[in-house]
Image (tube, grey):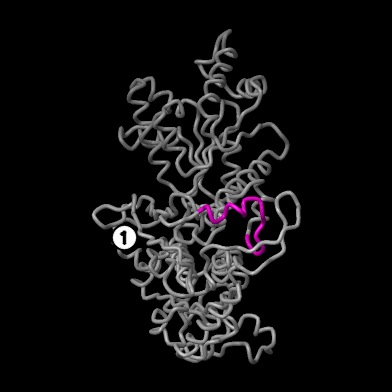
Amino acid sequence: MSFIEIFAVSMKIVFTGPKGAGKTTLGGGIAAFFNIPFIETDKALEDLYSKEYGETATCREIYSAHGENIFRELERRAVQSMHENNWCLISTGGGTLYDSSNRAVLRKNSVVVLLRASDEFLWSRVKQSKIPPFLAGEDGFLHFKERNQKLYDIVNPICDIVFEVGNPLAKERLAGEIAAFIMLGMASPNTFGEIVRVTTFGESHGRAVGAVLDGLLPGISVSEEDIQIELNRRRPNQSRVSTPRDEKDKIHILSGTFEGKTTGAPLCMLVYNEDHDSSRYDNLRDVFRPGHADFTFWKKYGLRDHRGGGRSSGRETVGRVAAGAVAKKLLKEKGIEIFAFAEMIAGVKGETEDFSVIEKNSVRAADPIKAAEMERAILKLQEAGNSAGGIVKCIIKGCPAGIGDPVFFKIDARLAMAFFSVGAVKGVEVGAGFAAAYLDAAENNDPMDGNGFLTNNAGGILGGISTGADIVLRAAVKPTPSITGKQQTIDIYGNEREISVHGRHDPCIVPRIVPVLESMAALVILDAIRMQEKLKGCF
């Protein structure tokens, strides 16, 4: 599998530049470097002409014989056919990009590279090959310069990389720039996933929060009711151990569906913030709350949204759950289900696992007896101006063997990243996890018989690939940092301060983080399955 296939599904690289810039030579070298097909606009146009007219001809001959209108129409269709290829490098000249429709097609899902150099350098290269008729004559160089400037004026606004040709090690340097650009694009801090990608947006006290879910196949049944079920599990003001902020979290699907089915376009989902009270945070405008991201956001960006933490608030997870609801539905149709629950809260650990009781108690524990103890422990801490943390256990059932990709796309690595991206999570383990460090190999290894694995210390994952057994994870969730008890801190000017944080906060975030972690697990597994489908065409 090539670099582009691994890191940029459906991505294309488009090379353009004046004559003499090395579009063919350098483009072919870069394509070989990334192990992807190399396609030239002229060749695609000539092949299309040959197929439709039953004769071979060069672009210049086609233009002379049929005129500009027919030539440009063939060119547009050739560009469209090229763009339907995935993971390729397309080389095209300035004439093709003069057409706005061609620019729009080639720009979509592409890294556009403009090759350029001084006019004198390029002209010397052109003269070494063969000067085309339209550049012949005494004014040839002048016309050449004018054409180059026209191309730069058109391409500069849409290009991602401008590369000066003629430098030593040009291919290696340009390959590095392209790779870095692609990696940066795939590492957007608000976007998660490779094929099935979710981008969340919004702040705690902004007008709304939500998500854009892309990469869904068309024809999938999706309704607001499907998503609302999961959002209701995450919403605040559910019990005595959650925040009294009374958000209804009603979902609105803005785009991506028609008559109840996905269209293949991005699915945009929105939830309005209706019960936020920013005045409660006025006294915290210049003060860093201990345990929150106030200090780090300030250091990184030079500003922060003090109203409930803004983007770093747990309110951001609304979008994750909305997207995860769709992913969970699709996985269930494949026989894959995800169950998360509070295994431990405030030192009280569950002793039984009954999935049927998880949604029947305030803390979402799988042990109904210990659930009551957990709730009492939370309320006791709340009365003392404090809060509780805990451990969430997540079990993924029905995931087939073979899902996940070595080395850096291991399924356990991706699940851990997904869980760690949730603000309150401070630790993740898979299977026996840290306990495996205290075992010897004979104790830790999972023996097998004809029916499968006899134990599951590996947590359903070996070598970063699913085994077919249950995938088992645990996430350590920190106590809610907003507490009424007095804490020592500093303000933005470096002055020492003592604060007590009042407002509407969860005394324990564990019960409401359960559906969030289920959603993140669902998005990872669905995305990994889609990657496997691309690789083998199975599942």
**Helix or strand or loop: what does disc 1 sit on?**
helix
Location of the C terminus (image quadrant): bottom left
Q: Is 272 drawn above or below residue 379 in the view shown?
A: above
Crowding at dot 1, Cα within 10 Å, few <14 / some 14-19 / many 20+, comes out as: some
Dot 1 amino acid type: Glu
The residue where tag 1 is placed is 224
User: Closer to the camera, 255 or 491?
Assistant: 491
The picture quadrant where one finds residue 408 is bottom right
User: Closer to the camera, 353 or 381?
Assistant: 381
* x and y, in percent, of residue 535 in the image: 47, 62
Residue 123 counted in the magenta span: no
Residue 288 counted in the magenta span: yes
Q: Give the residues drawn in magenta, as a range.
A: 278-292
* x and y, in percent, of residue 268 in the image: 38, 52
Q: Residue sitting at 35 percent across and 59 percent down?
A: 250
User: Closer to the camera, 293 or 381?
Assistant: 381
Q: Residue sitting at 66 percent across and 32 percent down?
A: 165
